[in-house]
Amino acid sequence: MAALRDALIETMLLEEKQFRRQLPDLVETHQLRNVDSDTADESPTDILQSLDALTSGSVTPFERKTIRKMVRLGMAPLGLTLTGPAYQDNPVRYATQTFQEMTGYSLATLRGENLRLLQGPATNPDAIATLQEGIDIWERRTVELWNYRADGTRFRNRVTIVPLTGPDGSITNWLGVQKAIDTAED
Ligand SMILES: Cc1cc2nc3c(=O)[nH]c(=O)nc-3n(C[C@H](O)[C@H](O)[C@H](O)COP(=O)(O)O)c2cc1C
């Protein structure tokens, strides 16, 4: 799964046109059965339309481009989240279907929230500090920590956060990649 995580991140970092070109490869290499790699279809209509209703006026063009890519990967086996701006405490801008299913939170609920809302009593403070440090110095970090679903059950979450460089070269947004890890305890 580590290979898929890295491949997803590298693909997400591609500019839109290259992203569309790369998608079929990603789907085939990692057998992503739920991801539609049809690059001719540029508008996964239903999701984007409902997203329009949800986000009109409140997302930057860069966020919009990023969300378009995330929508294509919405059913990938790892969750994807977009947050920003960092100076406003990284509120969620978008979260994929997989992430919503994994946590039990709808996009409507997640939007505007910092993802620390998933944390609770068993969450390791060292892991939180590692994420905080990555955000402070704009570097990628991966941690494993206890998170809690909307129904209160906990799961082991492996989280990678990746700084995203916008069109003007500055980092305002972050990409999150999340996966619930099987544990004997859970
Ligand atoms: C893109 C992104 C995704 C994140 N995903 C998670 C997550 O799934 N679970 C979690 O516990 N924290 C997640 N975080 C970390 C928290 O949002 C927060 O940055 C962390 O708790 C450290 O900050 P704090 O000490 O102010 O809480 C994510 C952060 C970013 C930027």
Image (cartoon, rainbow, N blue to C red):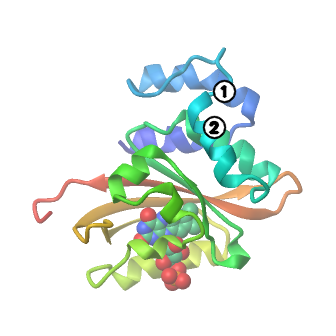
Which residue is under mark 1? 43
Task: Give residue 48's mark.
Answer: 2
Residue 165, image x, y percentages: 76, 55
Give neighbour class at mark 2: few <14, some 14-19, many 20+ (Cα, 10 Å).
Answer: some
Residue at coordinates 33% horizontally, 67% vertically from top-left? 150
Asked if the residue at label 1 sits under 8 Å from ligand 1, the reply is: no
Work out whether residue 107 or residue 140 is closer to the camera in this orientation and state it. Answer: 107
Work out whether residue 46 or residue 110 is closer to the camera in this orientation and state it. Answer: 46
| Most distant residue in the front direction | 53
Q: What kind of residue is marked 1?
A: Ser
| Disc nearer the start of the sequence (2/1) | 1
Left or right: 48, with 36 as reference point: right
Residue 87, image x, y percentages: 72, 78
Left or right: 81, with 127 as reference point: right
Secondary structure at badge 1 equals loop
Instruction: Tell me, yes or no, if residue 142 can be seen here.
Output: no
